[in-house]
């Protein structure tokens, strides 16, 4: 069996509390567990609405913020305990592609600067010719040529070109994992398909795994191998992407899938009654019950006592955090 490449163990991130931890707090992420294996390379999707904890997870994995509790293990080593040399290797092998490619560029430098800095920092080439070959090879993977783009300034490139260059910069380091945070949300439909295709080729041809952060279930369905659906910082449901999206089990995920418009003029969109509540009222403490309680038609008293764990649905790879699937206590009318 393949060894884990990345393991996230009970990662929790709490913001607020003040100096003496007496102020209000917000639980951005709670007890999240995730495993990405060394082989085969996979695309693991983290999906959910705004504020669900997706980007918080990405920032923890990338080391931009530290979890309040829990561990991030890379090839069995705790990232928090790594020395300088180990951290340098980790940063080389775990790369990032962000939502807004323009924000990554320094507008005062030509775009080749992003490649030059990588080559310099990681000592990847001994001369200019070798460096240029590395850059050209990376650009070719994303369908670009250096002579067309490297001497330009960021504002002279389209959003799609800037984003493909960021993928090329990440690929140049030959990483094992790319954390892609909403990489296609700011490009048009045709370029979105191109970038998604590049991700699939990097997975299949170069054994590069992705942690794909998105709110778009259609792209998750297109390219994702596994999916984790978050709700207010907790995992509502997880499993194989096709299985979860085609057969959702958690009441929140069912509502989320049902809210997607269908291309049928006979079917009205948005006509169903939806109960809403303050999104923050259930995430002020890790001891709160099910975050979806206020909007759930199946809610029970026990849902307020403690957050439900993930229960298996038919197979061990498909799990939902809902007491409806507690085999010993589930209502008879609910079946998996």
Image: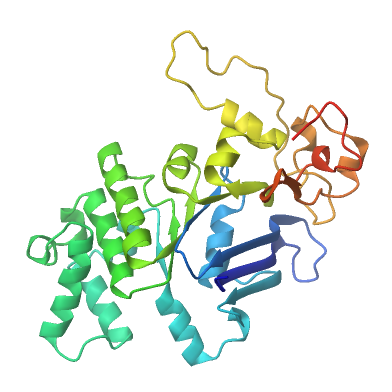
Residue 118, percent from left and from top: 29, 78
Q: Quadrant of residue 202?
A: bottom left
Q: Is residue 170 above or below residue 259?
A: below
Residue 50, percent from left and from top: 56, 44
- Look at the image and tell me whether residue 103 can be seen: yes
Q: Is residue 314 above or below residue 6?
A: above
Q: Residue furthest top?
A: 266
In the rendered image, the quadrant that contains the N terminus is bottom right
Residues 158 and 178: in front is 178
In the rendered image, the quadrant that contains the C terminus is top right
Is 69 left or right of 222, judged from the image as shown? right
| Colouring | rainbow
Q: Quadrant of residue 200?
A: bottom left
Which residue is painted at 78% across and 32% down in the image? Answer: 335
- Look at the image and tell me whether residue 229 can be seen: no
Which residue is painted at 33% across and 85% down in the image? Answer: 122
Residue 146, percent from left and from top: 12, 66
Q: Is residue 313 above or below residue 12?
A: above
Residue 329, percent from left and from top: 91, 40
Q: Residue furthest front?
A: 1
Residues 179 and 310: in front is 310
Is 247 left or right of 121, judged from the image as shown? right
């Amino acid at each position: 069996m393949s060894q884990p490449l990345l393991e996230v163990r009970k990662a929790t991130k709490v913001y607020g509390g003040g100096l003496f931890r007496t102020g209000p707090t917000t639980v951005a992420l709670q007890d999240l567990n995730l495993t990405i294996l060394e082989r085969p390379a996979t695309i693991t999707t983290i999906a959910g609405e705004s504020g669900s904890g997706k980007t918080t997870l990405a920032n923890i994995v990338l080391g931009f913020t530290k979890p309040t509790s829990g561990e991030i293990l890379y090839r069995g080593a705790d990232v928090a305990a790594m020395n300088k040399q180990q951290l340098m290797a980790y940063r080389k092998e775990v790369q990032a592609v962000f939502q807004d490619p323009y924000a990554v560029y320094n507008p005062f430098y030509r775009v080749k600067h992003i490649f030059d800095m990588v080559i310099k920092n990681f000592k990847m080439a001994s001369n200019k010719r070798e460096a240029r070959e590395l850059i050209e090879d990376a650009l070719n993977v994303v369908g670009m040529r250096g002579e067309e783009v490297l001497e330009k300034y960021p504002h002279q490139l389209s959003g799609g070109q800037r984003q493909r260059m960021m993928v090329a910069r990440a690929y140049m380091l030959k990483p094992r994992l790319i954390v892609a945070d909403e990489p296609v949300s700011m490009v048009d439909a045709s370029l979105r398909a191109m970038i998604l295709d590049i991700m699939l080729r990097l997975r299949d041809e170069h054994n590069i795994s992705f942690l794909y952060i998105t709110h778009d279930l259609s792209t998750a369905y297109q390219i994702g191998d596994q999916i984790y659906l978050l709700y207010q910082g907790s995992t509502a449901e997880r499993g194989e992407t096709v299985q979860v999206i085609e057969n959702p089990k958690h009441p929140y995920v069912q509502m989320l899938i049902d809210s997607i418009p269908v291309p049928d003029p006979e079917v009205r969109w948005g006509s169903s009654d939806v109960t809403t509540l303050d999104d923050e009222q259930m995430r002020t403490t890790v001891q709160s019950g099910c975050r979806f309680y206020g909007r759930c038609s199946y809610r029970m008293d026990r849902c307020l006592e403690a957050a439900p764990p993930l229960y298996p649905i038919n197979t061990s790879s498909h799990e939902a955090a809902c007491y409806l699937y507690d085999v010993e206590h589930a209502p008879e009318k609910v079946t998996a």
